[in-house]
Structures are given as structure tokens and as C-alpha cells.
Image (cartoon, grey):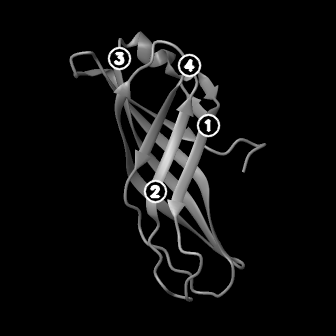
Amino acid sequence: TCTFPSGPERADVVISAVLPASAATGEEIHPGDVSVEVGLERSALGRFTGLEAATLAATADLTVRNTVGEHTADASWQGLQAPGMPLPTEGGAVLAATGDVPTVAFGSPGPATLAPAGLTLTLASFTEDGAPTTPPELTVACEPADDEE
């Protein structure tokens, strides 16, 4: 659920990364092919059509909870970029943000998990001629819905 100025909006978010099947204790793991896909409903895009936006881009900042045993630490995957896409005249939009993220190492043996804990989207809108709209950006905080992982 993302908090827009008009109220909460449900977003379909798919986060993916390539991780090794196993690693030694203390070994640095570098998540690869990181992608955050955010599907926004038409109701969430209304603000941008009101600004006469033609293109929408996004930056995704993701908080990832790293857990092994009873040890938990949050990591910040910042600055994942979704390139500009035409703002649809009907239906929703899917923005796909990608980029490099920091390595992670676990100091204790055992099964480890990396789980999304929060997402901040900075949505940037542009007019037909490529100029930023006024206002040029909207930042929204998202967190897993109560009924979702």
C-alpha cells in the first residue's frame, strides 16, 4: 500500500534479485539483476494527468531486512532507477526500477533471508516537450499490505 496525497493506493510490487544458493559465514554476497517492478492503478496516476504529464519515471529506495537466526539488520537499496515511460491514457502503469545494491554478509551460520520491509518511490513527471511538470516530483512511502508478504 502506497500513501498518495489522495489517500492510500494498492500497488502490485515484485522485487527480484539473483542470489547464490549458499555462502560461507562472513562471505560477501552481491545481489545481482535487482529489479523492483511497481504496478500502479489508474487511480494513483490521476495526479499526473492533472499536471498534463506525458512521461513518468521513478526512483525506488528499498529497505531490506536481512535475517539469520535471531540476528536482524536492515539494509538500504537506494537509487534504483525506472526510466521514463509514456503515461498511459487508460489503465495503470508498471515502472521497473533497476540498479546496483550493496553487498551483504551474514556473521552467523544458518538459513538467511532478505525480505523487503519498506519502499519509497519518487515519481517524476514530464510534459510532452520533456520539461518537468509543476511540481516535478512526488514521493510516496509504501509498505506491505496487511494481507501480503
Marks 4 and 1, how far apart in space? 12 Å
Residue 64 - label? none
Few, some or many residues within 10 Å of mark 2 (<14, 14–19, 20+): some
Marks 1 and 3, how far apart in space? 22 Å
Residue carrying label 3? 53
The reply to whether discs 3 and 2 touch (Cβ–Cβ < 8 Å) is: no
The reply to whether discs 3 and 4 touch (Cβ–Cβ < 8 Å) is: no
The residue located at (58%, 18%) in the rendering is 43
Specify the amino acid type for callout 3: Ala
Secondary structure at badge 4 equals: helix
Residue carrying label 1? 12
The residue located at (71%, 79%) in the rendering is 69
Badge nearest the viewer, 1 or 3:
1
Marks 2 and 4, how far apart in space? 26 Å
Seen in the picture, residue 48 relative to 106 is either above or below; the reply is above
Residue carrying label 4? 42
**Image quadrant assignment for residue 78:** bottom left
Seen in the picture, residue 94 relative to 73 is either above or below; the reply is above
Earlier sequence position, callout 3 versus callout 4? 4
Residue carrying label 2? 34
Badge nearest the viewer, 2 or 4:
2
Can you give x and y, in whole percent of width and height, for residue 32 in the image?
44, 64
